[in-house]
Image: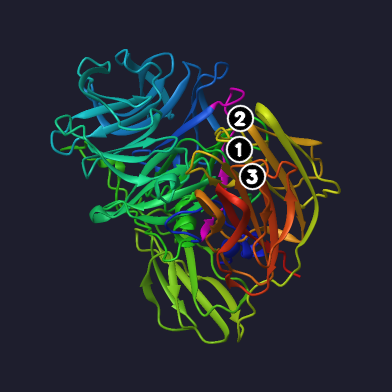
């Protein structure tokens, strides 16, 4: 077998995995943000504007390749549910209401049958329920009821199946209010009984919900300067929760707003809590047991599919469904789909797992279809078809670059048949049992060859290994050594309060030019959707009342507008854009800092991964007259006329930590700032 064409394409951008990072400071400061491209995107939803919201995965009871993704459309013109197959093709569309969040459970007792049940919040004040018709994967509505008046607009939704009582529950939330409803399908229609309600402490906006059906836990995502709360999931459990994840404003690792959350189930309580960070366009993984942070990943443009930004709901399955996803997949809403209307992007789980260091778990053992199965379990997914004699096809999906200086290597691989096992060999050594990803360390310089064979559940082994050969060169070149040059800059100031800051496009912006913007506010905020189209937030130093300073970036297209407008709360503001040629993208996560009145402000160091990276920083002070002096080794690029802030930059010749950067002020003032590194293109 050979490496797939998508992998070959990925190798041509191998620097991305090591070098492009999105986000801002956290307790895991400067940690790499893995870049993992989507391989499938769905057809767009039917509504316009902010329409697509959440997705849930349904696994077919006997043929996993016929599994579906069910997406919501909350718009007033699309308003409904859309069912997609694994290729992203729309199968069914149900324009039944402004559907917000969706979830799936199996073996729900409906009349005399056990069904796959889909539950969804309808913004027109109801919880709606559908059964999945296994024959054609269509949906049939089987019930609807309204939450109490405390839930003004039903948004967040999650099922929970109690392993203690066997009962099914539905959770719904809005503006901090949470209700738990016990579900009953004995009459052939789904009804609910309120068994618990409470209010989450802190910021009011709550939406993301997910229940862990094995650990009896409920997680609630809290937007704004919030976090993720963990509660007991049983109706008799306490309504006092534990905050297990905090946003960066409170010393945590995730940027607000926290949107969708989901559970990756592993054996023996292993697995992950996943969370979408809308403010940084990335996704965070936390250990399922103790919720410790494990790092983040982003979904860039790759494989002919645009990047995921401004995301909302997410879902994940560990279960192999064959085809493009033999080891499960991750699905997310995408706000800025390049074809216009919003849609959903899908990423193979093994690709995400392999992009982490150390690699995340790939564990197909948990079968969600067994939830509630009782004495009539769903068919064993490992039972092979009668008389199966056809071996599987093995494919390597990720590995090292063709030539590298690293003495370590990690390979991810899949089989064309779900629930296959694997054997691996390095440099013609004897085959050993292995799982994806397979990692090697301490390798010598020279040429190496990796082979992997898949074996299906019937015992058929791929006769021809999937193979990759690569070379390790002696010495460490330190990465790309291209040159980044700052070009033209632009700036704007609002001396009167306004909700819009418009900055003109700098001169001579060409396609591929990297633009970096700083926006400084007199105590206001940039709204969650306030960045101009195509701009991605890279930093937000907002921990003090005034000033608050944000960073954004964009790679210029062939046709850029004459100006860019940010939407803010009503405030005075200033902003600027600096342009850079020869830049491949961001090299590190940004660091941020803010402080009380002082004559200087220091932003923590960033650690670059390549030589000749360009450090770019922004510092803002609570004054219209104080003069700022740039840090040593950096040169002023922008300073507003009112001197509210400045952007400075400078090349760091060697890869590695560059030291903290300190701006000095002509008088003591409150301050806030950020620092990021830009990666040069390979020469």
Contact (CB < 8 A) between labels 1 and 2?
yes
Residue 571, disc: 2
The residue beneath circle 3 is 306
Secondary structure under tag 1 reads strand
Query: Residue 574: image x %, image y %?
Result: 68, 39
The residue beneath circle 1 is 521
Choose between 469 and 73: the one closer to the eye. 73
Mark 3 or 1, closer to the camera: 1
Secondary structure under tag 3 reads loop
Q: Is residue 117 left or right of residue 543?
A: left
Query: Residue 468 is drawn in which quadrant?
Result: bottom right
Q: Is residue 363 left or right of residue 91?
A: left
Query: For the magenta stretch, what is the residue range?
Result: 32-51
Q: In this view, does 469 lie to the left or right of 212?
A: right
Q: Is residue 491 left or right of residue 298?
A: right
Q: Residues within 10 Å of mark 1 (few under 14, many from 20)?
A: many
Residue 45 in magenta?
yes
Residue 194 visible in image: yes
């Amino acid at each position: 077998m050979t490496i797939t064409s998508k992998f070959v394409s990925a190798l041509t951008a191998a620097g991305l995995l090591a070098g492009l990072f999105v986000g801002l400071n956290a307790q895991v400061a400067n940690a790499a943000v893995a870049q993992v491209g989507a391989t499938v995107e769905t057809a767009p939803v039917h509504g316009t504007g902010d329409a697509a919201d959440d997705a849930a995965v349904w696994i077919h009871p006997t043929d996993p390749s016929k599994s579906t993704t069910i997406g919501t459309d909350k718009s007033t013109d699309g308003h409904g549910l859309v069912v997609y197959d694994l290729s992203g093709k729309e199968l069914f569309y149900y324009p039944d209401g402004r559907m917000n969040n969706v979830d799936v459970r199996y073996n729900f007792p409906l009349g005399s049958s056990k069904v796959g049940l889909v539950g969804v919040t309808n913004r027109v004040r109801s919880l709606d329920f559908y059964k999945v018709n296994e024959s054609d994967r269509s949906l049939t509505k089987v019930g609807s009821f309204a939450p109490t008046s405390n839930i003004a607009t039903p948004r967040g939704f999650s099922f929970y199946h109690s392993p203690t009582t066997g009962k099914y529950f539905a959770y719904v939330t809005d503006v901090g209010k949470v209700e738990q409803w016990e579900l009953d399908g004995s009459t052939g229609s789904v009804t609910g009984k309120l068994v618990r309600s409470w209010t989450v402490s802190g910021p009011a906006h709550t939406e993301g919900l997910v229940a862990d059906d094995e650990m009896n836990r409920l997680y609630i995502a809290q937007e704004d300067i919030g976090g993720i709360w963990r509660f007991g999931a049983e109706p008799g459990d306490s309504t006092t929760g534990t905050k297990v994840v905090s946003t960066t404003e409170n010393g945590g690792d995730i940027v607000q707003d926290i949107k969708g959350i989901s559970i990756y189930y592993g054996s023996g309580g292993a697995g992950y809590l996943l969370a979408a960070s809308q403010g940084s366009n990335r996704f965070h993984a936390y250990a399922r047991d103790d919720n410790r942070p494990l790092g983040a990943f982003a979904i860039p443009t790759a494989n002919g599919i645009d990047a995921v930004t401004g995301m909302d709901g997410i879902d994940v399955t560990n279960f192999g469904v064959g085809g493009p996803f033999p080891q499960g997949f991750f699905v997310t809403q995408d706000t800025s789909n390049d074809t216009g209307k919003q849609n959903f992007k899908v990423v193979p789980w093994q690709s995400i797992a392999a992009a982490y260091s150390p690699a995340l778990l790939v564990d197909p053992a948990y079968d969600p279809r067994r939830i509630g199965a009782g004495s009539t379990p769903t068919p064993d997914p490992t039972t092979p078809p009668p008389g199966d004699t056809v071996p599987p096809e093995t494919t390597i999906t990720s590995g090292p670059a063709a030539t590298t200086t690293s003495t370590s290597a990690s390979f991810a691989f899949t089989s064309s048949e779900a629930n296959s096992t694997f054997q691996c060999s390095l440099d013609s050594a004897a085959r050993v049992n292995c799982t994806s990803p397979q990692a090697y360390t301490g390798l010598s310089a020279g040429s190496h060859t990796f082979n992997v064979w898949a074996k299906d559940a019937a015992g058929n082994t791929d006769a021809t290994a999937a193979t990759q050969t690569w070379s390790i060169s002696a010495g460490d070149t330190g990465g790309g050594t291209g040159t980044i040059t700052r070009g033209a800059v632009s700036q704007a100031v609002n001396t009167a309060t306004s909700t819009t800051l418009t900055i003109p496009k700098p001169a001579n912006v060409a396609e591929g030019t990297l633009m970096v913007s700083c926006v400084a506010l007199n105590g206001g905020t940039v709204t969650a959707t306030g960045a101009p189209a195509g701009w991605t937030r890279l930093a937000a130093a907002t921990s003090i009342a005034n000033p608050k300073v944000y960073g954004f970036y964009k790679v210029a297209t062939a046709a850029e507008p004459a100006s860019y407008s940010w939407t803010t709360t009503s405030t005075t503001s200033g902003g600027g854009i600096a342009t850079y040629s020869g830049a491949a993208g961001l090299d590190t996560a940004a660091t941020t800092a803010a402080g009380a009145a002082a004559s200087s402000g220091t932003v923590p160091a960033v650690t670059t991964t390549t030589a000749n990276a360009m450090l770019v920083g922004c510092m803002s002070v609570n004054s219209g007259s104080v003069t700022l002096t740039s840090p040593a080794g950096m040169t002023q690029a922008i300073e507003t006329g009112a001197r509210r802030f400045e952007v400075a930059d400078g090349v760091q010749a060697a890869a590695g930590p560059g030291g903290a950067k300190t701006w000095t002020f002509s008088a003591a003032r409150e301050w806030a700032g950020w620092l990021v590194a830009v990666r040069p293109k390979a020469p």
